[in-house]
Image (cartoon, rainbow, N blue to C red):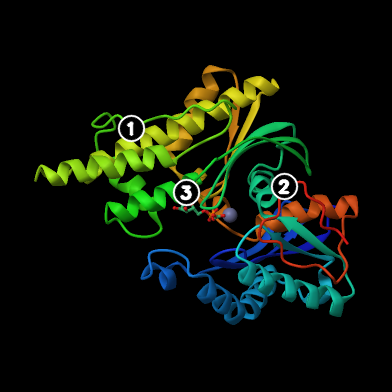
Amino acid sequence: MDNVLIMGIESSCDETSVSILSGGKTILSNIISSQISIHREFGGVVPEIASRQHLEAINGVMQAALDEAGVTLADINAIAVTAGPGLVGALLVGVSFAKALAYSLGIPLIPVHHIEGHISANYVAHPDLEPPFVCLVASGGHSHIVYAKDYSDFEILGRTRDDAAGEAFDKISRVLGLGYPGGPAVEKAAESGNKTAFKFPRVHLDNRFDFSFSGVKTAVINEIHKVKQKNEDLNINDVAASFQEAVTDILVENTIAAAKFKNVKTVCMAGGVASNTYLKNKMADSASKCGITLYSPPPVLCTDNAAMIACAGYFEYKKGNFSDLSLNAYPSLQLGENIIM
Ligand code: KG4
Ligand code: ZN
């Protein structure tokens, strides 16, 4: 089992990625073809363009993954693929490709939930990590606080009621004219800004682990309008720093509260927003004050990649959670929802 070779395939949004993992956690290759430069001129991901780009890229990305790993298709033991959630056309490219490979090679096909993938990136980055733990999953499409009871057994403790954290970063970046994707641009601008210049709202909801980022987004936009109406100069860096402060405060507060609620001493982070160094440092400070150990993947394993899908696939492989060839793409798939046919 420890030498099993899993090929992971990820195509749910704007990254075409294929990875080969040995024993579930050792990366032999993790090739990521990003479409960011293509979508940048539109200010966000254009679904139809994304599907076409995946189609063009996937064969070459798979070959590069095999070459870098120094293996051939005949060596692969199973194919793990993101089956949802995500853009339906984009998902279908990966799912169809995975089905064709599994069929022609006569090996198991493993559907993987994209968020389970993001969480599993922590096992790749920290092979000694074991469940249970609480994980903050914050990306462009999701903001969840998940209790990972076991390798593929999850309970969602909190979720966003409106925008995902990464989506809020992207929108604020756009109104500040900082470009796409917004997270890294806002983080960079914030480095030279004053985080106490503006007091943006921190929303607390009746489920104390849920998030809402639409209020902070509106507050930022109103503040920008006010400054412009007064014909004053807007210090973009101050807005970015104050916005980042508000968002990271609530992400950290809710995650640590959830860890205390579940009485776990391990917290993980996942998703594109987890590559934000300011957030990582704030989470680490808060965790250490409570005797909690923080794990987070390096940036390349935070944003979308296929190594995380192959890792999640490995744990499903051990349980025999295989799909037949009627597997579809599930754009709104819920974590824990059974799609095995
Ligand atoms: O996980 P991911 O690659 O794709 C989804 O599954 O959505 O996450 C992309 C999101 C984008 O919204 C991007 O702006 C955000 O992650 N992001 C960041 C940072 N790097 C990427 N947000 C805040 N700070 C960053 N450094
Ligand atoms: Zn993602």
Residue designated by label 1: 200
Residue at (36%, 71%) from the top-left corner? Answer: 41
Residue at the image point whose x is 53% and y is 28% from the top: 205
Q: Amino acid at mark 3?
A: Gly
- Residue 190 makes an appearance in the image: no
Where is residue 149 shown, x and y percent of the image?
77, 34
Mark 1 and mark 3 in contact? Answer it, CB < 8 Å.
no
Residue 312 versus residue 14 in the image, above or below: above
Where 98 falls versus 127 (above or below)?
Answer: below
| Picture coordinates of residue 199, whole percent (x, y) | 30, 29
Q: Which residue is disc 3 drawn over?
A: 166
Rendered position, 325 above or below 166: below
Quick one: label 1, few (<14), some, or many (20+) residues within 10 Å? Answer: many
> Which label's residue is closer to the chain start, 1 or 3?
3
The quadrant in which residue 28 appears is: bottom right
Q: Is residue 223 left or right of residue 141?
A: left
Mark 2 vs mark 1, CA separation in Å: 31 Å
Task: Compare marks 2 and 3 and give the one earlier in the sequence.
Answer: 3
Residue bearing mark 2: 335
Residue 88 falls in image quadrant: bottom right
* Quadrant field for ligand 2: bottom right
Label 3, secondary structure: give it: helix
Secondary structure of the residue carrying tag 2 is loop
Q: Give the Cα distance between marks 1 and 3.
A: 17 Å
Q: Is residue 217 visible?
A: yes
**Label whose residue precedes the other's in the sequence (2 or 1):** 1
Beta carbon of the mark 3 residue lies under 8 A of ligand 1: yes
